[in-house]
């Protein structure tokens, strides 16, 4: 299906994105594993390694969904804390969709972690300026309607010297990979969605939104335009995903 996101009003766009994630919330983690054959976990670990979490730091994970990145960030900082001491790190998971936040609450996984969940839109974050040491958004920015506004918001809530990490699906540049990738994403993913969650349309939307996302260099330029310094990106798995990073100086 093509939701024709370019031609519909902003408010409606936001509510359609919300509808998609309402419908996938309870099966989200299962589908993520099935769709990426578990590789999203490796990409998330690589993202955390690059962000290099430190004791006492405060992370904002925007579009944080079930809280995957936030937990990994705190645990990685804890490993450093075991060796060097310091305060525990903390994280705020902010997501526009309360169903995704609720689906992520897991007393077992959350035990001992300083983790807060807040419902909010990336385009107008409900936080004061200069609050966070790091901001992440993982597989979320492509769903945001006004990405420039969101990037400016990420910069606003970061402390000076704070860092941004954006993990997102991208279209792989190599032609031979593209053919395989097209077949997999258009034929397999919507069918997997149908089988595992009974919801083909939401997964079809996810595939199409990846195609519409700007190429890595174009997106890096947008991040620079939003005021970030030392912007760069790393392709993961031949460019099926990429991590963009930047600093607020
Ligand atoms: N970050 C998680 C991960 O990596 O597994 C979840 C990613 S999920 C594909 C995308 C998330 O973006 C959903 O939870 C959705 O509700 C959220 N989202 C979409 N638009 C948003 C917006 N404008 N502001 C905040 N969150 C948004």
Image (spheres, grey):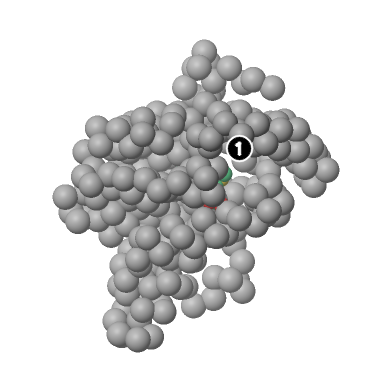
Q: Residue furthest top?
A: 7
* Residue 168 image point, x, y percent: 48, 43
Total count of labels: 1
Q: Can residue 229 be seen at all in this image of the molecule?
A: yes
CB of residue at label 1: within 8 Å of ligand 1? Answer: no
Whether residue 13 sits left or right of residue 246 in the image: it is right
Whether residue 225 sits left or right of residue 99 in the image: it is left
Residue ID for mark 1 = 177
Q: Quadrant of residue 194?
A: top right
Q: Residue furthest front?
A: 176
For image coordinates 41% across by 79% down, the residue present is 79
- Element carrying mark 1: helix
- Residue nearer the viewer, 164 or 130: 164
For image coordinates 54% across by 20% down, the residue present is 5
Whether residue 175 sits left or right of residue 74 in the image: it is right
Q: Quadrant of residue 56?
A: bottom left
Quadrant into which the N terminus falls: top right
For image coordinates 64% across by 41% down, the residue present is 22
Is residue 120 placed above or below 174 in the rendered structure? below
Q: Can residue 131 be seen at all in this image of the molecule?
A: no
Is residue 76 placed above or below 59 in the rendered structure? below
Estimate how packed mark 1 is, as few (under 14), some (14 to 19) or many (20 or more) residues with alpha carbons within 10 Å.
Answer: some
For image coordinates 36% across by 60% down, the residue present is 51
Is residue 224 placed above or below 58 in the rendered structure? above
Whether residue 211 sits left or right of residue 150 in the image: it is right
* Residue 162 image point, x, y percent: 25, 55
* Residue 196 image point, x, y percent: 80, 47
- Residue nearer the viewer, 241 or 2: 241
């Amino acid at each position: 299906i093509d939701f024709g996101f370019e031609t519909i009003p902003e408010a409606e766009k936001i509510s359609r994105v919300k509808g998609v994630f309402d419908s996938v919330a309870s099966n989200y983690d299962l589908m993520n594993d099935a769709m990426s054959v578990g590789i999203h976990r490796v990409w998330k670990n690589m993202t955390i390694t690059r962000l290099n979490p430190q004791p006492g730091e405060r992370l904002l994970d925007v579009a944080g969904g079930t809280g995957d990145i936030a937990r990994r960030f705190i645990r990685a900082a804890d490993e450093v804390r075991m060796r060097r001491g310091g305060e525990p790190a903390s994280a705020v998971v902010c997501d526009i969709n309360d169903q995704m936040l609720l689906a992520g609450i897991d007393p077992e996984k959350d035990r001992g972690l300083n983790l807060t969940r807040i419902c909010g839109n990336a385009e107008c974050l409900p936080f004061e300026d200069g609050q966070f040491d790091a901001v992440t958004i993982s597989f979320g920015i492509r769903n945001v309607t006004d990405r420039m506004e969101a990037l400016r918001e990420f910069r606003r809530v970061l402390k000076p010297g704070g860092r941004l990490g954006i993990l997102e699906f991208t279209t792989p540049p190599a032609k031979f990979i593209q053919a395989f990738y097209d077949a997999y994403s258009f034929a397999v993913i919507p069918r997997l969605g149908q089988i595992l969650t009974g919801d083909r349309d939401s997964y079809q939307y996810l595939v199409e939104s990846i195609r519409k996302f700007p190429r890595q260099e174009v997106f890096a330029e947008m991040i620079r335009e939003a005021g970030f310094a030392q912007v760069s990106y790393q392709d993961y798995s031949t460019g099926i995903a990429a991590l963009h990073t930047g600093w607020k100086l």
